[in-house]
Image (cartoon, rainbow, N blue to C red):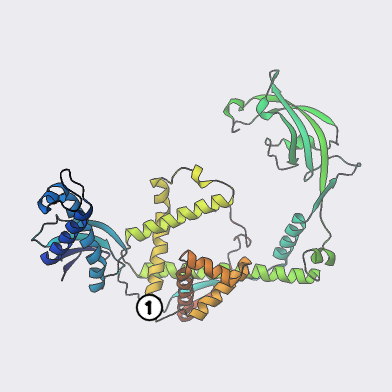
Amino acid sequence: MTSIQVEDLSDVKKKVTFEVPQERVLEVVGAQYKDLRKNAQVKGFRRGKVPLNILRNYFKDKVQGDAAKQLIEETFKPGLDEQRITLVSVLTIDPEAVEEGKPFKYTAEIEVPPQIEVKDYNSLKLKKYVRSVTDQQVDERLQNLRQRNSSLSPIPESRGVATGDHLVADIKAETDGEPLRDLTVTDYHLELGRNFYLPDFDSMFEGLRPEEDKRFTKTIPEDFPRKNLRGKTATFEVHLKEAKERILPELDDDFAKDLEFDTLDALKQEIKQDIQRMLDLQTKKELEEQIVDALIEKNEFEVPESMVDQQIDNIMNRSMQNLAAQGIDPRRLPTPTDAQRERVRPGAERTVKAALILKAISEKEEIEASEEEVQTEIEEKAKQMGVSSDYLKDQLEKNNMLEEVRAQLLEDKTYKLIQEQAEISEQEPPSDEPAPGKKSEEE
């Protein structure tokens, strides 16, 4: 029977020493030589007839290595299970040499989850910002819908181009009589007022009509991306080839019907409900952030580094997936640097701590997620994604992500329990917070 000794190196690290009895070592080594003898090829001997002493001379190192590997594989996990040790990661395994007639010893340094006795989670003081949908928010959403469903039409003959019009133009640029190829373009598309070509360049088109030309000079700004052009005075010749204005649909029942709503009021009601869902989700996230902040402050414990590193990997992988969704091939990007990983480490550590604390609370409170609740959650997610629940469940099972759904349900139920036991004061939200769906400039 394997002898096991456990030494605590820290709250999340252990040194485990295994000693396999010599009888088992002899069995494994003997079996290794027996299998080797069947196929070993040594000059002067027929296959399967090589004497044992010759095999030892030729293959001793291989047999010792294979035997050590086998002995570790058959004793490591069962030994941890016997000691009721939950493994997070293996840091090192240091085996001694396998010798016939002697026990085989090896040591492993491992990481384990911290033992958390969560305290002070049932009397938190939380702030809840109460948000209601405003008419302005509904109107802004409607105007965005009008923009997305607008059309372009040639501008009236009675006027020249103005801000917001969409133009197609040829632009020639030169300096000191020499053409500037970097700034000379044909069939250049621009929306007047955006100034994508050069700062304050679009204003030079104002008042022009299709097929008209204009010549003017401008100084290229000092912060222009192309260093060789910075500060130069250039002469521009523009020829306006086409000008169209954006025509917005009327805000009426016909517009709503185009969007598959019976009336404009029905569309407004759907918009209002959607914005309220976003506001409620924002409030929910804020409460959860407050809970995490309070629990981390009240419960200090060490976090396994491998769990933090895994969370950093998750963050980096999500970033790559976002780039891929934008049409950027992640394989053409450099591997994230150590500095980039360190920048996200504090957030990754916070996420790991939050998950460990919530798990400890759910276990203490005996919170569970039933199969019916998991199925309901899958059906809701499938509905949002526009796929069948059977398809989504199959994909989750294939990618070993079904337990993630259960874990998220447990977290949600744990957050709910904490909020039910908390002292929550309702307040007006900050007056300068961004509108739902928008980010502040600092973000």
Figure disc tally: 1
Q: At 72% from the left edge and 65% from the top edge, which residue is drawn?
A: 138
| Near-viewer residue (415 or 432) | 415
Q: Decide if residue 128 is on the left or right side of residue 178.
A: left
Q: Position of residue 304 (x, y in %)?
A: 32, 61
Q: At 20% from the left edge and 64% from the top edge, which residue is drawn?
A: 16
Q: Position of residue 150 (x, y in %)?
A: 79, 54
In the rendered image, is residue 430 in sight? yes
* Image quadrant occupied by the N terminus: bottom left
Q: Position of residue 236 (x, y in %)?
A: 74, 27
| Near-viewer residue (308 or 200) | 308
Q: Decide if residue 168 is on the left or right side of residue 330.
A: right
- 51 to 307, vertically: above or below: above
Q: Position of residue 179 (x, y in %)?
A: 69, 22
Check the image and name the residue furthest to the right: 158
* Residue indicated by mark 1: 363
Check the image and name the residue furthest to the front: 46
- 70 to 379, vertically: above or below: above
Quarter of the view holding residue 32: bottom left
Q: At 41% from the left edge and 69% from the top edge, which residue is drawn?
A: 294
